[in-house]
Image (cartoon, helix red, strand yellow):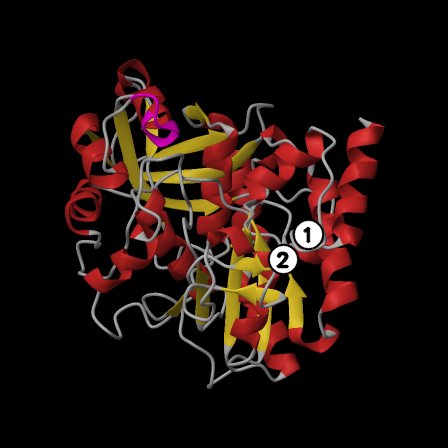
Protein backbone atom coordinates (compact mmCIF):
# COMPACT_ATOMS: atom_id res chain seq x y z
CA UNK A 1 0.00 0.00 0.00
CA UNK A 2 3.04 2.28 -0.37
CA UNK A 3 1.35 4.29 -3.13
CA UNK A 4 -1.75 5.11 -1.08
CA UNK A 5 -2.49 8.48 0.45
CA UNK A 6 -1.53 8.41 4.16
CA UNK A 7 -4.27 8.74 6.77
CA UNK A 8 -4.72 12.15 8.39
CA UNK A 9 -1.91 12.51 10.91
CA UNK A 10 0.01 9.61 9.35
CA UNK A 11 -1.53 6.59 11.10
CA UNK A 12 -4.92 4.93 10.81
CA UNK A 13 -6.46 4.73 14.28
CA UNK A 14 -8.03 1.50 15.54
CA UNK A 15 -9.76 1.65 18.95
CA UNK A 16 -11.62 -1.66 18.74
CA UNK A 17 -10.74 -4.06 21.56
CA UNK A 18 -10.06 -7.72 20.81
CA UNK A 19 -9.51 -10.95 22.72
CA UNK A 20 -8.67 -10.95 26.41
CA UNK A 21 -8.51 -7.16 26.63
CA UNK A 22 -12.07 -6.91 25.29
CA UNK A 23 -13.27 -9.57 27.74
CA UNK A 24 -11.66 -7.71 30.64
CA UNK A 25 -13.29 -4.35 29.84
CA UNK A 26 -16.59 -6.03 28.96
CA UNK A 27 -16.78 -7.37 32.51
CA UNK A 28 -15.26 -4.24 34.09
CA UNK A 29 -17.90 -2.04 32.40
CA UNK A 30 -20.53 -3.47 34.77
CA UNK A 31 -18.73 -1.88 37.74
CA UNK A 32 -18.02 1.53 36.23
CA UNK A 33 -20.03 4.76 36.32
CA UNK A 34 -22.09 5.08 33.15
CA UNK A 35 -23.07 7.57 30.47
CA UNK A 36 -25.91 6.67 28.13
CA UNK A 37 -25.17 8.09 24.69
CA UNK A 38 -27.56 8.92 21.86
CA UNK A 39 -27.47 7.72 18.25
CA UNK A 40 -25.37 10.64 17.04
CA UNK A 41 -22.72 9.97 19.67
CA UNK A 42 -22.80 6.27 18.83
CA UNK A 43 -21.99 7.26 15.25
CA UNK A 44 -19.03 9.32 16.51
CA UNK A 45 -17.83 6.37 18.62
CA UNK A 46 -17.90 4.11 15.58
CA UNK A 47 -16.12 6.67 13.38
CA UNK A 48 -13.36 7.09 15.97
CA UNK A 49 -13.07 3.34 16.53
CA UNK A 50 -12.55 2.38 12.88
CA UNK A 51 -10.17 5.23 12.12
CA UNK A 52 -12.52 7.32 9.98
CA UNK A 53 -11.74 10.27 12.29
CA UNK A 54 -7.99 9.63 12.50
CA UNK A 55 -5.99 10.98 14.27
CA UNK A 56 -8.68 11.30 16.97
CA UNK A 57 -8.56 8.46 19.50
CA UNK A 58 -11.45 9.71 21.60
CA UNK A 59 -13.42 12.81 22.54
CA UNK A 60 -11.57 16.13 22.54
CA UNK A 61 -10.05 17.66 25.63
CA UNK A 62 -10.14 21.42 26.22
CA UNK A 63 -6.99 22.47 24.32
CA UNK A 64 -7.91 20.57 21.17
CA UNK A 65 -11.49 21.82 21.42
CA UNK A 66 -10.39 25.47 21.68
CA UNK A 67 -7.90 25.22 18.81
CA UNK A 68 -10.50 23.56 16.59
CA UNK A 69 -13.16 26.15 17.30
CA UNK A 70 -10.82 29.11 16.82
CA UNK A 71 -8.39 27.95 14.15
CA UNK A 72 -9.79 24.75 12.56
CA UNK A 73 -6.74 22.92 13.88
CA UNK A 74 -5.89 20.54 16.67
CA UNK A 75 -3.47 21.71 19.32
CA UNK A 76 -0.72 20.00 17.30
CA UNK A 77 -1.48 22.29 14.35
CA UNK A 78 -2.99 19.52 12.23
CA UNK A 79 -6.06 20.75 10.32
CA UNK A 80 -9.35 19.67 11.87
CA UNK A 81 -12.60 21.65 11.39
CA UNK A 82 -15.17 20.37 13.90
CA UNK A 83 -15.35 19.70 17.65
CA UNK A 84 -15.89 16.01 18.39
CA UNK A 85 -17.10 16.04 21.97
CA UNK A 86 -19.13 14.17 24.58
CA UNK A 87 -21.56 16.19 26.70
CA UNK A 88 -23.01 15.31 30.10
CA UNK A 89 -25.02 17.21 32.69
CA UNK A 90 -23.24 18.83 35.66
CA UNK A 91 -24.79 16.26 38.02
CA UNK A 92 -23.44 13.43 35.89
CA UNK A 93 -20.02 15.05 35.65
CA UNK A 94 -19.81 15.23 39.46
CA UNK A 95 -20.01 11.43 39.55
CA UNK A 96 -16.84 10.98 37.47
CA UNK A 97 -13.22 11.29 38.58
CA UNK A 98 -10.60 12.34 36.07
CA UNK A 99 -8.00 9.69 35.27
CA UNK A 100 -10.70 7.08 35.79
CA UNK A 101 -12.89 5.09 33.41
CA UNK A 102 -16.51 5.61 32.38
CA UNK A 103 -18.67 3.04 30.58
CA UNK A 104 -20.47 4.43 27.54
CA UNK A 105 -23.75 2.61 26.92
CA UNK A 106 -26.32 2.68 24.15
CA UNK A 107 -29.98 3.50 24.86
CA UNK A 108 -30.69 -0.22 25.37
CA UNK A 109 -28.14 -0.38 28.19
CA UNK A 110 -25.41 -2.26 26.30
CA UNK A 111 -21.83 -1.27 27.07
CA UNK A 112 -20.34 0.04 23.82
CA UNK A 113 -17.07 1.68 24.87
CA UNK A 114 -14.83 2.68 27.75
CA UNK A 115 -13.90 6.35 28.10
CA UNK A 116 -10.54 6.94 29.78
CA UNK A 117 -11.50 10.27 31.28
CA UNK A 118 -8.78 12.91 31.22
CA UNK A 119 -10.71 16.15 31.55
CA UNK A 120 -14.07 17.71 32.46
CA UNK A 121 -14.71 21.21 31.18
CA UNK A 122 -17.39 23.69 30.17
CA UNK A 123 -17.43 25.88 27.06
CA UNK A 124 -19.08 28.98 25.61
CA UNK A 125 -21.76 27.57 23.29
CA UNK A 126 -22.46 30.93 21.69
CA UNK A 127 -18.80 31.27 20.72
CA UNK A 128 -18.80 27.73 19.34
CA UNK A 129 -21.93 28.40 17.30
CA UNK A 130 -20.58 31.65 15.86
CA UNK A 131 -17.26 30.06 14.87
CA UNK A 132 -18.36 26.60 13.71
CA UNK A 133 -21.76 27.38 12.17
CA UNK A 134 -21.16 31.08 11.38
CA UNK A 135 -24.44 31.89 13.11
CA UNK A 136 -26.04 31.84 16.55
CA UNK A 137 -29.54 31.58 15.07
CA UNK A 138 -31.35 28.90 17.14
CA UNK A 139 -33.31 27.87 14.03
CA UNK A 140 -30.13 26.57 12.41
CA UNK A 141 -30.19 22.76 12.90
CA UNK A 142 -26.55 22.59 13.95
CA UNK A 143 -27.06 25.38 16.49
CA UNK A 144 -30.17 23.58 17.75
CA UNK A 145 -28.16 20.41 18.42
CA UNK A 146 -25.42 22.46 20.10
CA UNK A 147 -27.90 24.19 22.41
CA UNK A 148 -29.41 20.81 23.33
CA UNK A 149 -26.00 19.35 24.19
CA UNK A 150 -25.39 19.04 27.95
CA UNK A 151 -23.14 21.74 29.34
CA UNK A 152 -20.15 19.73 30.61
CA UNK A 153 -17.79 18.02 28.17
CA UNK A 154 -15.78 14.88 28.94
CA UNK A 155 -12.46 14.45 27.15
CA UNK A 156 -10.36 11.34 26.77
CA UNK A 157 -9.52 8.35 24.61
CA UNK A 158 -12.01 5.55 24.09
CA UNK A 159 -11.72 1.79 23.71
CA UNK A 160 -14.65 0.16 21.94
CA UNK A 161 -16.08 -3.07 23.30
CA UNK A 162 -18.92 -3.57 20.85
CA UNK A 163 -18.84 -1.95 17.44
CA UNK A 164 -22.45 -1.11 16.56
CA UNK A 165 -22.74 -2.32 12.95
CA UNK A 166 -26.24 -2.75 11.47
CA UNK A 167 -26.81 -6.05 9.68
CA UNK A 168 -28.44 -4.44 6.66
CA UNK A 169 -26.14 -3.84 3.69
CA UNK A 170 -23.15 -5.37 5.45
CA UNK A 171 -21.28 -5.63 2.14
CA UNK A 172 -21.37 -1.83 1.91
CA UNK A 173 -20.04 -1.14 5.40
CA UNK A 174 -16.30 -1.41 4.84
CA UNK A 175 -13.99 0.28 7.33
CA UNK A 176 -11.27 2.68 6.14
CA UNK A 177 -8.73 -0.14 6.31
CA UNK A 178 -10.99 -2.48 4.33
CA UNK A 179 -11.73 0.24 1.78
CA UNK A 180 -8.02 0.89 1.32
CA UNK A 181 -7.47 -2.84 0.71
CA UNK A 182 -10.29 -2.82 -1.86
CA UNK A 183 -8.69 0.13 -3.68
CA UNK A 184 -5.35 -1.66 -3.69
CA UNK A 185 -6.89 -4.86 -5.10
CA UNK A 186 -8.44 -2.80 -7.90
CA UNK A 187 -5.15 -1.08 -8.63
CA UNK A 188 -6.66 2.37 -8.01
CA UNK A 189 -4.24 5.13 -7.09
CA UNK A 190 -6.34 8.23 -7.72
CA UNK A 191 -9.72 7.80 -6.05
CA UNK A 192 -12.44 10.44 -5.96
CA UNK A 193 -15.15 10.43 -3.30
CA UNK A 194 -18.70 11.66 -3.74
CA UNK A 195 -20.63 12.55 -0.58
CA UNK A 196 -24.43 12.38 -0.65
CA UNK A 197 -27.54 11.60 1.35
CA UNK A 198 -29.99 12.04 -1.54
CA UNK A 199 -30.82 10.08 -4.69
CA UNK A 200 -28.27 10.83 -7.40
CA UNK A 201 -29.71 12.96 -10.20
CA UNK A 202 -28.21 13.82 -13.59
CA UNK A 203 -26.18 16.77 -12.30
CA UNK A 204 -24.52 14.55 -9.68
CA UNK A 205 -23.84 11.88 -12.28
CA UNK A 206 -22.24 14.48 -14.54
CA UNK A 207 -19.84 15.62 -11.79
CA UNK A 208 -18.93 12.02 -10.96
CA UNK A 209 -18.15 11.18 -14.57
CA UNK A 210 -16.11 14.36 -15.03
CA UNK A 211 -14.07 13.34 -11.98
CA UNK A 212 -13.62 9.82 -13.33
CA UNK A 213 -11.92 11.28 -16.39
CA UNK A 214 -8.93 12.17 -14.19
CA UNK A 215 -9.21 9.47 -11.50
CA UNK A 216 -8.92 5.67 -11.53
CA UNK A 217 -11.99 5.04 -9.40
CA UNK A 218 -15.06 6.63 -7.84
CA UNK A 219 -16.24 5.97 -4.30
CA UNK A 220 -19.94 6.80 -3.95
CA UNK A 221 -20.07 7.28 -0.19
CA UNK A 222 -23.60 8.08 1.04
CA UNK A 223 -24.19 9.20 4.60
CA UNK A 224 -27.18 7.26 5.86
CA UNK A 225 -26.55 6.97 9.60
CA UNK A 226 -29.48 9.29 10.38
CA UNK A 227 -31.43 8.98 7.15
CA UNK A 228 -34.34 7.23 8.81
CA UNK A 229 -35.60 10.75 9.48
CA UNK A 230 -35.30 11.63 5.79
CA UNK A 231 -38.12 11.37 3.26
CA UNK A 232 -36.66 8.23 1.66
CA UNK A 233 -35.76 5.09 3.65
CA UNK A 234 -32.28 3.63 3.52
CA UNK A 235 -33.29 0.65 1.38
CA UNK A 236 -34.73 2.95 -1.29
CA UNK A 237 -31.63 5.15 -1.36
CA UNK A 238 -29.39 2.11 -1.65
CA UNK A 239 -31.45 0.68 -4.52
CA UNK A 240 -31.12 4.03 -6.30
CA UNK A 241 -27.33 3.94 -5.97
CA UNK A 242 -27.13 0.29 -7.01
CA UNK A 243 -29.35 0.86 -10.05
CA UNK A 244 -27.36 3.87 -11.21
CA UNK A 245 -24.06 2.00 -10.94
CA UNK A 246 -25.39 -1.09 -12.70
CA UNK A 247 -26.93 0.84 -15.60
CA UNK A 248 -24.67 3.84 -16.16
CA UNK A 249 -21.15 3.22 -14.82
CA UNK A 250 -18.34 0.81 -15.70
CA UNK A 251 -18.44 -1.75 -12.92
CA UNK A 252 -14.68 -1.86 -12.45
CA UNK A 253 -14.38 1.87 -11.81
CA UNK A 254 -17.04 2.54 -9.16
CA UNK A 255 -17.45 1.37 -5.58
CA UNK A 256 -20.41 1.93 -3.25
CA UNK A 257 -19.80 2.14 0.49
CA UNK A 258 -21.79 3.55 3.41
CA UNK A 259 -20.34 6.48 5.36
CA UNK A 260 -21.34 5.78 8.99
CA UNK A 261 -21.13 9.33 10.35
CA UNK A 262 -23.85 11.71 11.46
CA UNK A 263 -24.74 14.94 9.70
CA UNK A 264 -23.03 17.89 11.39
CA UNK A 265 -25.03 20.71 9.70
CA UNK A 266 -21.84 22.79 9.64
CA UNK A 267 -21.75 23.97 6.04
CA UNK A 268 -18.22 24.93 4.90
CA UNK A 269 -16.48 23.40 7.91
CA UNK A 270 -18.35 20.16 7.29
CA UNK A 271 -16.99 20.10 3.74
CA UNK A 272 -13.45 20.05 5.17
CA UNK A 273 -14.55 17.31 7.58
CA UNK A 274 -15.89 15.30 4.62
CA UNK A 275 -12.53 15.69 2.87
CA UNK A 276 -10.42 14.62 5.85
CA UNK A 277 -12.56 11.60 6.68
CA UNK A 278 -12.56 10.48 3.00
CA UNK A 279 -8.78 10.83 3.02
CA UNK A 280 -8.79 8.35 5.90
CA UNK A 281 -10.78 5.97 3.71
CA UNK A 282 -8.00 6.23 1.12
CA UNK A 283 -9.45 8.79 -1.29
CA UNK A 284 -7.09 11.23 -2.99
CA UNK A 285 -9.83 13.58 -4.29
CA UNK A 286 -13.31 14.66 -3.22
CA UNK A 287 -16.04 16.32 -5.27
CA UNK A 288 -17.15 19.63 -3.76
CA UNK A 289 -20.08 21.03 -5.70
CA UNK A 290 -22.34 24.01 -5.33
CA UNK A 291 -23.94 24.19 -1.85
CA UNK A 292 -21.95 21.23 -0.56
CA UNK A 293 -23.25 20.37 2.94
CA UNK A 294 -25.67 23.27 2.66
CA UNK A 295 -28.06 24.17 5.45
CA UNK A 296 -30.96 26.20 4.08
CA UNK A 297 -29.80 29.70 3.20
CA UNK A 298 -27.15 30.10 5.88
CA UNK A 299 -24.16 29.78 3.54
CA UNK A 300 -23.18 31.08 0.13
CA UNK A 301 -23.38 28.74 -2.84
CA UNK A 302 -19.61 28.29 -3.03
CA UNK A 303 -18.55 28.87 0.59
CA UNK A 304 -17.77 25.15 0.93
CA UNK A 305 -15.23 25.51 -1.87
CA UNK A 306 -13.74 28.78 -0.66
CA UNK A 307 -12.94 27.41 2.80
CA UNK A 308 -10.28 25.10 1.35
CA UNK A 309 -8.27 28.22 0.48
CA UNK A 310 -7.68 28.71 4.21
CA UNK A 311 -5.31 25.74 4.23
CA UNK A 312 -1.89 25.44 2.65
CA UNK A 313 -1.54 23.75 -0.72
CA UNK A 314 -0.50 20.38 0.72
CA UNK A 315 -1.85 20.52 4.27
CA UNK A 316 -4.95 18.43 3.68
CA UNK A 317 -3.28 16.21 1.03
CA UNK A 318 -6.68 15.24 -0.39
CA UNK A 319 -7.59 17.39 -3.40
CA UNK A 320 -11.02 19.07 -3.63
CA UNK A 321 -12.48 18.98 -7.14
CA UNK A 322 -14.60 22.13 -7.18
CA UNK A 323 -17.48 22.18 -9.65
CA UNK A 324 -19.99 24.83 -10.54
CA UNK A 325 -23.70 24.07 -10.63
CA UNK A 326 -24.44 21.55 -13.38
CA UNK A 327 -27.70 21.76 -15.36
CA UNK A 328 -29.15 20.25 -18.51
CA UNK A 329 -29.11 22.66 -21.47
CA UNK A 330 -31.85 22.02 -24.02
CA UNK A 331 -29.87 23.85 -26.70
CA UNK A 332 -26.54 22.13 -26.01
CA UNK A 333 -28.52 18.90 -25.47
CA UNK A 334 -26.35 17.83 -22.57
CA UNK A 335 -25.16 18.52 -19.04
CA UNK A 336 -23.26 21.80 -18.71
CA UNK A 337 -22.02 24.43 -16.28
CA UNK A 338 -21.56 28.15 -16.73
CA UNK A 339 -17.97 27.37 -17.75
CA UNK A 340 -19.05 25.26 -20.73
CA UNK A 341 -22.41 26.66 -21.87
CA UNK A 342 -23.12 30.08 -23.45
CA UNK A 343 -26.91 29.91 -23.10
CA UNK A 344 -29.10 31.72 -20.59
CA UNK A 345 -31.20 30.21 -17.80
CA UNK A 346 -34.36 29.74 -19.90
CA UNK A 347 -32.47 27.06 -21.86
CA UNK A 348 -31.60 25.17 -18.68
CA UNK A 349 -33.23 22.45 -16.57
CA UNK A 350 -31.85 22.66 -13.05
CA UNK A 351 -32.36 20.25 -10.15
CA UNK A 352 -31.36 19.53 -6.56
CA UNK A 353 -31.76 16.37 -4.53
CA UNK A 354 -34.23 18.06 -2.22
CA UNK A 355 -36.30 19.39 -5.11
CA UNK A 356 -36.29 15.95 -6.77
CA UNK A 357 -37.75 14.35 -3.65
CA UNK A 358 -40.41 17.06 -3.38
CA UNK A 359 -41.48 16.55 -7.01
CA UNK A 360 -41.65 12.79 -6.59
CA UNK A 361 -43.73 13.04 -3.44
CA UNK A 362 -46.11 15.42 -5.22
CA UNK A 363 -46.49 12.92 -8.07
CA UNK A 364 -45.00 15.30 -10.63
CA UNK A 365 -43.45 14.07 -13.85
CA UNK A 366 -39.64 13.90 -13.76
CA UNK A 367 -38.02 14.51 -17.16
CA UNK A 368 -35.03 12.30 -18.09
CA UNK A 369 -32.89 15.45 -18.24
CA UNK A 370 -33.30 15.67 -14.45
CA UNK A 371 -33.06 12.05 -13.28
CA UNK A 372 -32.60 8.67 -14.91
CA UNK A 373 -35.98 6.94 -15.46
CA UNK A 374 -34.74 3.81 -13.66
CA UNK A 375 -34.00 5.85 -10.53
CA UNK A 376 -37.37 7.60 -10.70
CA UNK A 377 -39.10 4.22 -10.98
CA UNK A 378 -37.36 2.89 -7.87
CA UNK A 379 -38.50 5.89 -5.86
CA UNK A 380 -42.05 5.93 -7.25
CA UNK A 381 -42.55 2.26 -6.37
CA UNK A 382 -41.31 2.89 -2.85
CA UNK A 383 -43.55 5.92 -2.36
CA UNK A 384 -46.57 3.99 -3.68
CA UNK A 385 -45.73 1.14 -1.32
CA UNK A 386 -45.77 3.58 1.60
Instruction: Determine the image quadrant of residue 252.
Output: bottom right
Q: In this view, does 285 lie above or below 24?
A: below
Q: What element carries label 1?
A: loop
Which quadrant is the C terminus positioned in? top right
Q: Is residue 190 above or below residue 204?
A: below
Residue highlighted by disc 2: 202
Q: Which of 29 and 9 is in front in this view?
A: 9
Q: What is the C-alpha distance between the residues marked 1 and 2?
A: 5 Å
Q: Is mark 2 on a helix, strand or loop?
A: helix
Instruction: Determine the image quadrant of residue 178.
Output: bottom right
Residue highlighted by disc 1: 371
| Tag 1 near tag 2, CB within 8 Å | yes
Label 2: few (<14), some (14–19) or many (≥20) C-alpha neighbours in 10 Å: many
Percent position (x, y) of residue 359? 66, 35
The answer to whether residue 82 is visible is: yes
Earlier residue among tags 1 and 2: 2
Q: Is 162 a magenta residue?
A: no
Q: Which of 309 and 163 is in front in this view?
A: 309
Q: Is residue 113 above or below residue 285?
A: above
Q: Which of 335 and 9 is in front in this view?
A: 335
The residue positioned 69% from the left and 30% from the top of the image is 361
Q: Is 141 a magenta residue?
A: yes
Percent position (x, y) of residue 89? 31, 18
Find the magenta span and give its range. Answer: 138-143
Percent position (x, y) of residue 80? 28, 54
Label 1: few (<14), some (14–19) or many (≥20) C-alpha neighbours in 10 Å: many
Q: Is residue 218 above or below residue 259?
A: below
Percent position (x, y) of residue 3? 47, 85
The residue positioned 54% from the left and 29% from the top of the image is 106
The answer to whether residue 56 is visible is: no
The residue positioned 47% from the left and 27% from the top of the image is 31
Judged left or right of residue 30, residue 356 is right
Amino acid sequence: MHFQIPPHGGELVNRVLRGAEREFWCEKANTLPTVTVDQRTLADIKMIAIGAMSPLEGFMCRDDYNHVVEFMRLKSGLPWPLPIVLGVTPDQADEFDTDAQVALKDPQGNAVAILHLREKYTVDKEREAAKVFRTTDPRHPGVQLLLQRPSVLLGGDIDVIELPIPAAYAEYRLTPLETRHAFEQRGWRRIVSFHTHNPIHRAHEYLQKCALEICDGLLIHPLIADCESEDLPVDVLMRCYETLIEEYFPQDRVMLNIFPGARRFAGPREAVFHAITRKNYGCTHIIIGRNHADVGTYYGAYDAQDIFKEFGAHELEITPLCFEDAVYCRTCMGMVTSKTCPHSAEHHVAMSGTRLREMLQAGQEIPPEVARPEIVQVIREALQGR
